[in-house]
């Protein structure tokens, strides 16, 4: 059997049970018909990924699929989140042969932004109220304007065009769409659910990767003619799962986000044991990445929720206590290995911590040399040349340093000012609002976790797409007209979901409850 068919078979088998779990969680929030679309589009996009003989084939297939997304989905923007992680996030140079050989580096999230978010944005733009500026918009525009202006120093029209197109697809488009399309507590919970559904199957696949020491999606990367310097990365003898994120730490970031969104999810009906089953899958996926930064981020998110919601956390701790006592009493062999992998405690891969320390010291020297506007050639500085690793690369494993080195302290100030503004306003909202429709504290905890984790990694793979999209969701729930009351959640549970039904995306729409029918969101059908 060809390698790509064997990989596809494993993925479909592993994904089926976790998608069933996802259906149980999604049913009270989006209904059976909408979840069937989410599930079927994910499955079809996965099949397209493995059957395509190149990125062009994949792009055409996804573009055709997006036509059905806009026609049959009630809120197409959320399908962008569900499908964001469906294919390997590798950059593919694209352009016009003979004119511009390389206009833009495309990857699946950018292509989804073009095929799904752009039509939604055009529909939203027709509403004059939607186009009105808000407070946080100014900070985003300031950062975009500054980074776009600095692209002039590259002196190459192709490079300038590439920077402008990247800023539009990576930041401007997701921010505009998600800061506008989310208008109620129900919408916010749908967006959180989209992250959960999109990440759940990949978490299970990550467990498969570490168990079999096999990169399941690597065959797709090869078919797309992309060369990876480190196709297989190990830590303490364990393969670090990466699935479609390519980078293990990016996959950990994905799983951390999915788990945090599940903790923040509010449902009109109790999710019971299904929430714990889904959380277990997501945590196992997080562990399979063997990435300590996302581990710390998720721990911080849980700790934040424990401090801000002691009653619920105490009940959860009591429920987990028997399992924790059993593990400590039995002391299985994997426990010592897990402790050895923990940051600050274990001794595995100490060189990673040493590298980060040296990178910070050398980066400060370069930043002092180009303090305000940074340098587009900072990697050529002698201090940075000493940081070349065995693969022949300089890994800037700190997003804040990455921004300061390239865009200077002004760029870093604008970047941090935006996220500080979102966090500060969200903190006031979470501790002053008694709404039951949105879990503001959990959303704030996850945002803080993201901002912590990017201290330990550069903005590679899907990481920037996630934090810009999620921050836009936060900006939406902070908007003056946001309806975050309990009554905005549907009051009735839709019909039971037939998970084993047809996988055709042309599934009919079952009628939803009256509470959901009254919701109107721009950009829907």
Image (cartoon, rainbow, N blue to C red):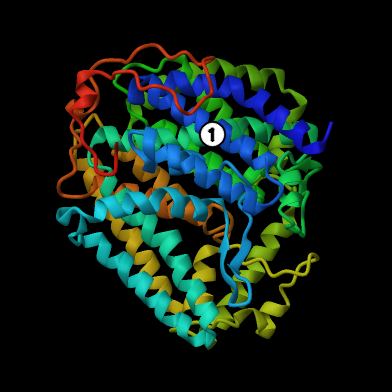
Q: Position of residue 486 (x, y in %)?
A: 20, 27
Write down the quadrant of residue 269 in the picture: top left
Q: Position of residue 418 (x, y in %)?
A: 33, 63
Furthest residue toward front = 98
Q: Nearer the viewer, residue 440 or 437?
A: 437
| Looking at the image, residue 71 lies above or below residue 512 | below
Mark 1 residue crowding within 10 angstroms, few (<14) / some (14–19) / many (20+) = many
- Residue at image position (67%, 23%) is 13
- For the N terminus, the quadrant is top right
- Looking at the rendered structure, the secondary structure element under dot 1 is helix
| Looking at the image, residue 123 lies above or below residue 312 | below
Q: Position of residue 264 (x, y in %)?
A: 37, 34
Q: Position of residue 183 (x, y in %)?
A: 23, 42
| Residue 324 visible (yes or no) | no
- Residue at image position (56%, 51%) is 108
Find disc 1 in the rendering and name its residue. 42
Number of labelled discs?
1
- For the C terminus, the quadrant is top left
| Looking at the image, residue 287 lies above or below residue 234 | above
């Amino acid at each position: 059997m060809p390698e790509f068919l064997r990989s596809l078979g494993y993925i479909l088998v592993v994904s089926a049970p976790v998608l069933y779990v996802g259906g149980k969680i999604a049913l009270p929030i989006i209904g059976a018909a909408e979840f069937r679309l989410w599930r079927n589009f994910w499955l079809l996009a996965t099949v397209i990924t493995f059957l395509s003989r190149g990125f062009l084939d994949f792009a055409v297939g996804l573009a055709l699929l997006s036509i059905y997304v806009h026609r049959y989905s009630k809120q197409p923007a959320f399908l962008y989140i569900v499908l964001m992680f469906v294919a390997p996030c590798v950059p593919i140079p694209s352009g016009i042969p003979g004119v511009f050989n390389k206009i833009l580096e495309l990857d699946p999230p950018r292509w989804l932004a073009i095929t799904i978010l752009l039509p939604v944005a055009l529909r939203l733009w027709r509403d004059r109220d939607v186009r009105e500026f808000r407070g946080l918009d100014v900070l985003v525009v300031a950062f975009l304007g500054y980074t776009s202006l600095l692209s002039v120093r590259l002196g190459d029209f192709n490079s300038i065009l590439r920077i402008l197109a990247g800023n539009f697809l990576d930041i401007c488009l997701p921010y505009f769409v998600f800061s506008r399309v989310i208008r109620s507590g129900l919408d916010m919970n749908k967006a959180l659910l989209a992250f959960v559904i999109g990440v759940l199957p990949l978490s299970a696949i990550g467990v498969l990767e570490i168990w079999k020491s096999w990169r399941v999606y690597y065959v797709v990367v090869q078919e797309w003619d992309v060369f990876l310097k480190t196709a297989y990365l190990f830590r303490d003898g364990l393969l670090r799962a990466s699935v479609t994120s390519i980078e293990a730490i990016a996959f950990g970031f994905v799983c951390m986000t999915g788990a945090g969104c599940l903790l923040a999810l509010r449902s009109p009906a109790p999710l019971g044991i299904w929430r714990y089953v889904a959380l277990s899958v997501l945590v196992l996926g997080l562990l399979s990445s063997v990435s300590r930064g996302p581990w710390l981020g998720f721990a911080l998110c849980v700790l934040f929720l424990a401090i801000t919601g002691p009653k619920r956390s105490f009940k959860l701790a009591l429920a987990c206590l028997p399992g924790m006592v059993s593990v400590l009493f039995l002391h299985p062999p994997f426990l010592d290995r897990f402790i050895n992998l923990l940051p600050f405690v274990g001794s595995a891969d100490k060189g990673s911590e040493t590298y980060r320390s040296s990178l910070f010291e050398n980066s400060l020297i370069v930043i002092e040399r180009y303090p305000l506007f940074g340098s587009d050639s900072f990697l050529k500085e002698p201090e940075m040349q000493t940081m070349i690793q065995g693969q022949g690369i300089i890994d800037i494993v700190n997003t804040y340093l990455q921004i300061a080195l390239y865009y200077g302290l002004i760029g870093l100030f604008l970047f941090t000012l935006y996220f500080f503004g979102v966090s500060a306003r969200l903190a006031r909202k979470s501790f002053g609002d008694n709404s039951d429709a949105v879990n503001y504290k959990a959303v704030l905890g996850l945002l803080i976790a993201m901002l912590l984790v990017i201290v330990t990694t550069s903005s590679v793979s899907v990481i920037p797409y996630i934090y810009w999209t999620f921050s836009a969701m936060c900006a939406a729930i902070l908007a003056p007209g946001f309806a975050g009351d309990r009554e905005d959640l549907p009051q009735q549970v839709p019909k039971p979901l037939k998970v084993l039904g047809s996988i055709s995306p042309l599934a009919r729409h079952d009628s939803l409850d009256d509470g959901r029918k009254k919701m109107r969101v721009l950009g829907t059908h």
